[in-house]
Amino acid sequence: MSTVYTNDLRLKEIGTGLESGTWGTSTNTNLSLIAEAFSYQTEATFGSDANVTTTIADGATDKYRAMYVKVTSSTSLTATRTLTIGPNTCSKVIFIENATSGNQIITVKQGSGATVNVNNGKAKLLLLEGTGASAGVIDALDKIDLGANATINGGEFGITADETATFTNKTINGSNNTITIADSSIASNAAIDATKIADGSVTSAEFQYINTLSSNAQTQIDAKLNSALPNDAWLSSADGRNRLYFTSNANTVMKFDTQWRVDNNAGSTMLSCDTSGNFTATGNVGAYSDMALKEDIYQIENALEKVNKLRGVHFTRKSDNAKEIGVVANEVEKVVPELVDEHEDKELGTVKTMKYANTVGLLIEAVKDLSKQVEELKNASNK
């Protein structure tokens, strides 16, 4: 038998009859290496920002023979780096601590099999399979059952009072399963899913509609409902469309896509306005005209003469190409300025508007003037 290093500790296995005169030295070296296998070592494994392969030396001291290796780096790592531990026939238990700089993960590998990630600043107990080219690395604590009486730092349920723990998908059972959390212990950015409260019928979004409840909920809701609507901001409907806008100390603007209308409680439309600006009322449209509202009342003079100076026209409305008849406000203003007003249009600026209803007074007096002329002609022809 020749001298070999095929064991997992890479010790010198002295062949029968060999090492004459040096057997004691080799044996002492092997004993030192066995002690090294139970030791704690620190090794600057990553000399550059790249993957590394380290192979446990045969029959000589090697830090990766140790049970616990604190892996450091002489340069800052910029990404996850792989640490391959050879040879791939070596089966052993090893703690790997990731103490590299750069806050990166190191991936521990042996052959083509499974690997284990070790987060920066953490350590893991690993098992090297040592099965050759296909050897993998196993997380030794992945399936460890700590037992019913296990604790961490002496704390009940494995948690001490000054520790922070995150419970994910865990169920607390038993007769005394009450958890008490002080108000001061709840983080300011903590989020509670409303669907997990009571029967889950209230959504998290609905909770957001109530702002900073300080006393009776109904009182707070009433206060919100009675609060003034904002100025200079659109009020939108649930479909995301702008509906109402209140300018400061000025206008109220309403938007609609197809029709603006007013319905009575029976659902019947009383008045409406379409996208072309046509306003329709199912009843009469009236304006105040009482004597108590007026002064300096006097009859229209030369009404027929004024009417004769006006012209009725056919025209096409530019906005929708509708064919209509009416008058031109600019022309009417030159004859009867009282029938014309001005309006500020968002796109056109100042435009003339016509008080069509007020033309009734002018037409009445014009008809009376015309009737008088007819009567005079009839009387003249009878003489």
Image (cartoon, rainbow, N blue to C red):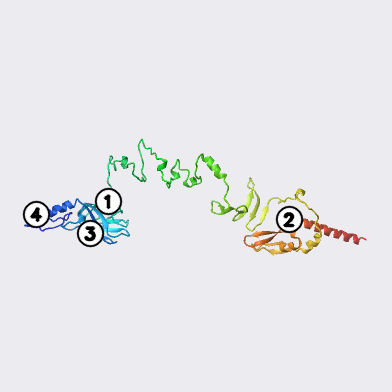
Q: Position of residue 329 (x, y in %)?
A: 71, 62
Real-space CA distance between mark 4 and mark 2, rounded to the nearest whole angstrom: 127 Å
User: From the viewer's perspective, is the residue at label 1 or at label 4 nearer?
Assistant: 4
> Which residue appears farthest toward the right when viewing the image?
383
Amino acid type, mark 3: Thr
Secondary structure under tag 4 reads helix
Secondary structure under tag 3 reads strand
Amino acid type, mark 4: Gly
Quarter location, residue 11: bottom left
Q: Which residue carries the number 2 mark?
A: 357
Q: Position of residue 25 (x, y in %)?
A: 10, 55
Q: Residue at x 67, y 54 (%)?
A: 280
Mark closest to the chain's N terminus, 4 or 3? 4
Q: Which residue carries the number 1 mark?
A: 124
Real-space CA distance between mark 4 and mark 3, rounded to the nearest whole angstrom: 29 Å
User: From the viewer's perspective, is the residue at label 2 or at label 1 nearer?
Assistant: 1
Is disc 3 surrounded by few (<14), some (14 to 19) or many (20+) residues within 10 Å? some
Amino acid type, mark 2: Ala
Mark closest to the chain's N terminus, 4 or 2? 4
Viewer-closest of 375 and 9:
9
Q: Which residue carries the number 3 mark?
A: 54
The numbered mark at residue 24 is 4
Q: Residue at x 45, y 44 (%)?
A: 194
User: Do the residues bearing badges 4 and 2 touch, measured as CB atoms within 8 Å?
Assistant: no
Amino acid type, mark 1: Lys
Viewer-closest of 243 and 378:
243
User: Do the residues bearing badges 4 and 3 touch, measured as CB atoms within 8 Å?
Assistant: no
